Image (tube, rainbow, N blue to C red):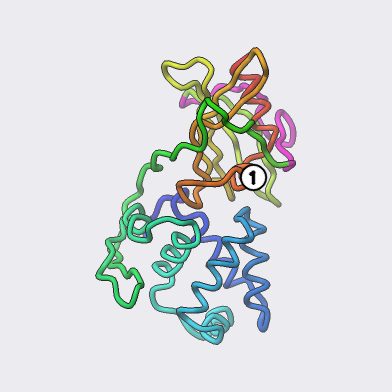
Amino acid sequence: MVINRKMTGMFAISIAALLGSCGGKVKSEFVAGCTAQGAPKSKCTCLYGKLKDRYGEEGLEAMQEGKTELPGMLEATVVGTAQCSGVDPAVALRRLGIEPRATVAGETHATIPEAAVSRAPTTPEPAGSSSGAAQARGSSAECIEDQDGAPSFGSLQDDGRVFLCREPVEIYWNDWYGSKVDGNSNSVKIVGEGKTSMFEGELRVDCNTNSAYWASASTGFGDNPSEEDIREAIPERVISNARRYVCG
């Protein structure tokens, strides 16, 4: 089944974390592996609980040890992730080209097609407004330019975006890009692409005060991320370079 990477990041992370966990330590290793890939710990813990409720700890251990394949694992992970993120599971399934079936005993089920088509990212929900919006903040994660193979800041890409910085993730990375929003010279669309990032957001910048706030943002783990979720998902360097891009 071919599914758009941005839409399945946490799902793949979660299953990989489970398969890579050590015998007898399924929960701790699952959560550690999931958070190591950039997902919030609270959501990783919640998702493990959803999977345990469905398959039992013995079933998860058996899958980890390669003794069995758990039926409906992709569906269960999609539904669990949606529930832990405050998103309607049926909506999450449809975004992946999976048609939900009837609801039984409070659980959303689905019919998974032989091949699911890739979907364009959904429009992010507003994360703030110009009146009283919180200052945009990022994490302390490293984000580099013009070194270790990373392009230089401001490099123009073939699709018209500019390179902001590269966030190393173990032996991989997330690349961050910006592009001006049509009709608003002080707004920049920021996108994170790579190993762990599914971020998309519109940053409004005030060049007079050097301040910035999110007009909209989606971390890929639900359509209404908290300020903390956004801060964990994006390095501070991305925001500061976005200011440089907008204000010069």
- In-front residue for pair 212/28: 212
Q: Is 34 situated above or below 65?
A: above
Is 212 on the left-hand or right-hand side of 221? right
Q: Is 186 situated above or below 121?
A: above
The residue lying at 33 percent from left, 60 percent from top is 90
| Mark 1 surroundings within 10 Å by alpha-carbon count, few (fewer than 14), some (14 through 19), many (20 or more) | some
Pick the quarter of the image with the C terminus.
top right
Q: Which residues are magenta?
A: 140-159
Pick the quarter of the image with the N terminus.
bottom left
Residue farthest along the left direction in this orientation: 102
Residue 128 position within the rendered picture, expressed as x and y whole percent measured from the top left:
52, 34
The residue lying at 67 percent from left, 16 percent from top is 209
Q: Is residue 146 magenta?
A: yes
Q: Is 48 situated above or below 8?
A: below
Which residue is under mark 1? 173
Q: Is residue 154 magenta?
A: yes
Is 238 on the left-hand or right-hand side of 193? right
The residue lying at 63 percent from left, 40 percent from top is 234
Task: Inspect the image, locate mark 1, and give the three-letter code of the amino acid beneath it.
Answer: Trp
